[in-house]
Image (spheres, coloured by chain):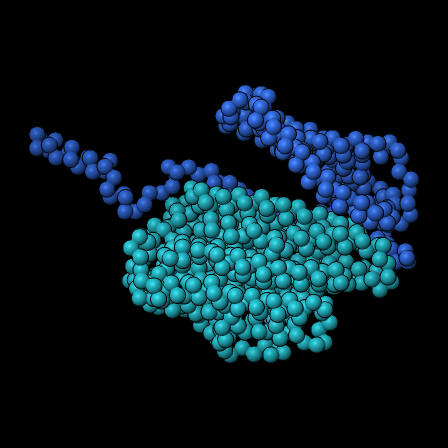
Chain colours: A cyan, B blue
Amino acid sequence: MNPYLLSQLPLIGGFVFLLVLASLMPHRKEGISSIIAIISLCSTAVAIWIFLPEGAQYFGGAIRVTSVGKLVAYVCLGLTAIGMVLSEDYLDKVRVNGLDWRMVVLALALGMVNLSLAGDLATLFIAYELVSIPSYVLAGFSHKDPRSNEAGMKYLLLGVFTSVLFLLGLSFIYGATGEINLLAIHDKLARAVEAGATADLTLAKIGLAFLMGAVLFKVAVAPLHSWLPDVYQGTNLASLAIISSPVKVAVFGMLGMLLWGVFEPLSDLWKPVLLLGAALSAIMGNLQAIVQTNIKRLVAYSAVVNGGFILLGILVNSVPIVVFYLGSYGIMTMGSWAALMAMGTRHADVDEISDLAGMGKTHRWLALALTVILLSYAGIPLTSGFAAKFGVVLDALRPDAGLPPMTLWVVFLSVCGGLVSFYFYFQIIRAMWLQSAPAESADRRASGADLRWNYAFVLILSVVVILSLGMFVRLPGM
Amino acid sequence: MRGVNLSSTRSGTVPVSPVVEITFAISAVIILLSSLAVVLVKNPVRATLLLIVSFLPTSLVYILLQAAFVGILQILVYAGAIMMLFTFVIMMINPSPKDGESPVGGSDGGEGAFSGLRGALIGLLFVGAAGAMVLPLVYHAASQVSVGPVTKPGFGGLASISALLFEDPANNPMTVSFELISFLILVGIIAALNFSRRKGAEPAKPDSISTRPTEALPIVRREPAMDAK
């Protein structure tokens, strides 16, 4: 049997199993479905590791296995499995049908895996859609909540807009090169650049511009980020964990692989765009985050800031650093959502920063874990957040990197932005440890005793990963 | 310098017949106007019908591009089946008309007309600005790419499309996309089922079952009956 199909079999099998389960016993307690989903996600990662050798091509080049693609796929599958662990109890709370939710997430995981393994334009676009459409569904999943409706609708409309741009870009690139295979496109572009055929490249450049606009919109890099906080605020935390962590990793991974693997001959065009995106993200993300009082919106702006750093990492083409950054950012985000889920009650989530006041006294361990995660967001040494940012900056400052002349200033700006970000991360930490609990938010906070095992598990996991990645991992070039 | 042609598989230019160009121009104008009208018209039924109007010249464009099968599918599937469903659903849920608007095809009120006109102007402005920026560039770039006649017999027909999609499935790049699309459709179905679920259909909370009055009632009634026996 085709090794590619074998590697996808656990995911597809899990999906079909849940589909049958949903039709046979729709009102069963959903505990078993999450176990099935986690098993199929993990075994897919193992199957990719076993069956797909690097450099292999399947289905006439539609699937091309690269080392980066495999790494991104592992990170995405692992983070999705963690999100699945988190969803266990929370979905009942927000009245979401767990079976449906898990099926959508499994399809999303299939999309992410294929996005990182795509070898031609058709597969790339279908996988991109298989990542996007389940994300819109997830954002609007608690459809009795008007805010969730708004989030889903906003995400859908803007997302469809970016999909159209993406497709337009792909069709221009196909029109310019007459190929759908990514490797062949790369070869043709390289040959055209070598021969100095600038006139022939114009169409390809227009296509690349559309493509980058779409993807940068999708990953919410400033100035295309204004939709992100609204979507984060309206989405329930379980769906948000999926949208904000593995999906982001997959799309950033795709961006890096496309730019360096396919459009490397046109790097004069896209390097300044990445630089501009990184600079604007550092400025706008940090400044807008300062005035936020809602935790989800704050994390959304922090995602914009981190996106800027990831763009810098892509710019300097240090694959280990980018994958490290993506993984560490993903696990931090998962941890922060786990802490927020654990702090809410059966009926409501913690929402504002002031809801967290006094958490340090009532929920000591939860507050401690969230503090570690926030310190990692801010980039304090000994955490993985620091290691990742340090790695990006160090690579960008290498003299032989061959970067645009403004890179140094953008790196400086990003680091300064990191200093600004201390303010808003420490606002949460200050509220938790130094303020006393106000009376009015008592109905939105869980009592200290009932910490569920899955939240505790994810929190401990993310804190351990953050600290060990920050202290013991030595990246190449550091 | 035109030494390296990016699209080396296609070479040589053919003079395009003026009939083709005129047909394309007319179709393009109709597509643009009717799609703009879809967004600006307030009545949903009219918007749907205008969307169908915009599909017909689109299929003509496909046919001009020698993709006759896709053009016919566009009419059969989109204009025929899907928009039929759209119209059916819109008429079935029968959205209540806003003030100053009759249910089927009423004219807009004064305020509505003003906002519609303003919306149209702003929309035209945006479209015009974007077009003015992008179109010359695209036109220039596209004119550099030489397009030749399609020499393959039966190009764009049913046989060639099915060969493209299904020939030699183990080595065909389209196989993966084709299979992944089925998952996309499944996700759409799951989402639609989930969103269409009403409030009453969701399972009751465990703690509310024991306190439901309907379950408490039979016990109260049965006791006097047993006494009488």
Name which residue lies at 71% across and 47% down: A168
Name which residue lies at 34% across and 50% down: A347
Name which residue lies at 71% across and 62% down: A272
Q: Name the spot of residue A124 as percent of width and height, x first.
A: 66, 54
Name which residue lies at 85% across and 34% down: B20
Please count the marks in the image: 0
Question: As displayed, is residue A183 above or below residue A27?
Answer: below
Q: Is residue B142 left or right of residue B79?
A: right
Q: Name the spot of residue B210 as percent of width and height, x first.
A: 24, 43
Q: Tell me if residue A457 can be seen.
A: no
Q: Name the spot of residue A337 as percent of width and height, x first.
A: 44, 59
Near-viewer residue (B38 or B147):
B38
The answer to which image quadrant residue A65 occupies is bottom right
The answer to which image quadrant residue B33 occupies is top right
Q: Name the spot of residue A203 as percent of width and height, x first.
A: 79, 51
Near-viewer residue (A90 or A105):
A90
Near-viewer residue (A463 or A439):
A439
Q: Is residue B11 left or right of residue A157?
A: right
- The quadrant of the picture occupied by the C terminus of chain B is top left
Question: As displayed, is residue B183 above or below residue A41?
Answer: above
